[in-house]
Image: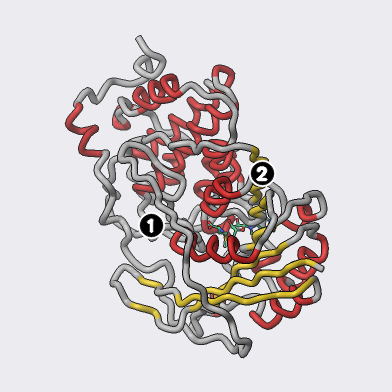
Amino acid sequence: MSRIQQYSPKINSAGVVAERFLPQGKQIQGALFDLQVQTATFDVQAQRIDETYLYVPQIKKDCHQLQNRRYIGSKQKLIEWIFSVIELECENANSFTDIFAGTGIVSAVATKHFKKVILNDFLHSNFAIYNAFFSNEKWDKNKIYRIIDEYNTINGAYLEDNYFSKYFGNKYFSVDSSKIIGFIRDDIEKNKVNLTTKEYYILIASLLYSIDKIANTVGHYDAYFKKSRVEDQFIMKPVDPLETRQVAIFKQDANVLAKQINTDVVYIDPPYNSRQYSRFYHVLETLTKWDKPELYGTALKPAPENVSDYCKVQAKYRFAELVRDLNSKYLVVSYNNTYDPKSHSSKNKITLQEIKDILTSKGKTKIFEKDYRHFNAGNTDFKNHKEYLFVTEVK
Ligand SMILES: C[S@@+](CC[C@H](N)C(=O)[O-])C[C@H]1O[C@@H](n2cnc3c(N)ncnc32)[C@H](O)[C@@H]1O
């Protein structure tokens, strides 16, 4: 008898499992933010380019790929433009740092262009995800698939309540799914001695991606939809690790790491407003750390951790320090002009003019812009939203 079957009965219906693998197409239930976009007061002429870089994401039905994630500020849809600019502007560059890496999608493409890539983000969940997708340590695919198959036989109705279900049951997830999620997370920890580091993180990342597909939210965990009964069906799918060469992974404050690294290109994509990533993705953080802290408030958040200065008034000073301390040939900075005048929290923390001035102190700076059509679930087109890319050739 397998390890999991000892704890719980089998669902034992191939039909049920197959059906659960269907894409969660109807999941996005509202806009992330109710944006009303204004044009930024930025009078510098930016350049537009023809995009030459072709990025074709692989589509695999039965596993989660790096980009299959709902994440605020993900550059997935801008990746071709970003790399077209980098290809054009950053000559003789062999190494690349993604210092606010978020989903890691920029690094994933960078691994195809640069010999060495460094990823960094201070969130625990992102660190786990990078280790799962990017680390070139050994892992046993059959072993991982076997463990996940076993997890998918668990029936929540037969499990006792646990930490995860006590807090999140019938809130972010159904009672049964949250019992299964908590049970699996406990089991990964108990089984850690039998796993390589990469295998451990592959299981955690697979759990994180899988819960994200069913979460009763608009895509982040600042709130959940209030329902008398949350209905969902949890199924765990494995992540699909990338083929990588030389990759280094960090979980540090960007300003601390800046003093320790030296690569040809540093890509800088900080938060743009006062919304803290650690608070928006707290459920993923809690599930990754698994130190079972007390949770507070309606949204059930832990005590604050990894609160970013880039979301506060001091953002421009931190940015200036970062730029000063980085040792590289090129700095590439993403920023946009989107904010909602009705919502103070969405206002940009650094102005585009301030970014330009700070970067110009480090070297010759070019600015590229792209209209970016931002849609909400109702397909409303938010006009005048521009993405900017600043490229500085360091003196
Ligand atoms: C705009 S997102 C990056 C998005 C990313 N480029 C992508 O395509 O997915 C900013 C990221 O910076 C991280 N972050 C914020 N402040 C940080 C800090 N001081 N040090 C390290 N990471 C930080 C957040 O956790 C978040 O993932």
Quarter of the rendered image showing ligand 1: bottom right
- What number is the disc on residue 191? none
- Residues 290 and 309: in front is 309
Q: Is residue 289 above or below residue 276?
A: above
**What whole-number distance in Å separates the C-alpha atoms at marks 2 and 1?**
37 Å
What's the coloring here? Answer: secondary structure
> What x and y, as percent, mark residue 262?
78, 51
- Left or right of 252 on screen, residue 11: left
For ligand 1, tell me if the residue under mark 1 lies within 8 Å: no
- Left or right of 319 on screen, residue 169: left
Q: Which sits earlier in the primary sequence, circle 2 or circle 1?
A: 2
Badge 2 marks a residue whose secondary structure is strand
Q: Is residue 54 visible?
A: yes
Residue occupying the point 48% across, 25% down: 187
- Residues 253 and 305: in front is 253
Which image quarter: residue 267? Answer: bottom right
**Mark 2 lies on residue:** 116
Badge 1 marks a residue whose secondary structure is loop
Quarter of the figure with the C terminus = bottom right
- Residues 147 and 269: in front is 269
> What x and y, as percent, mark residue 282?
54, 51
- Left or right of 228 on screen, residue 278: right
Q: Identify the amino acid type marked 2.
A: Lys
How crowded is the residue under tag 1: few (<14 C-alpha within 10 Å), some, or many (20+)? many
Which image quarter: residue 146? Answer: top left
Q: Is residue 290 visible?
A: no
Q: Is residue 193 above or below residue 260?
A: above
Residue occupying the point 35% across, 70% down: 376
How crowded is the residue under tag 2: few (<14 C-alpha within 10 Å), some, or many (20+)? many
Q: Identify the amino acid type marked 1.
A: Thr
Number of numbered labels in the structure image? 2
**Mark 1 lies on residue:** 217
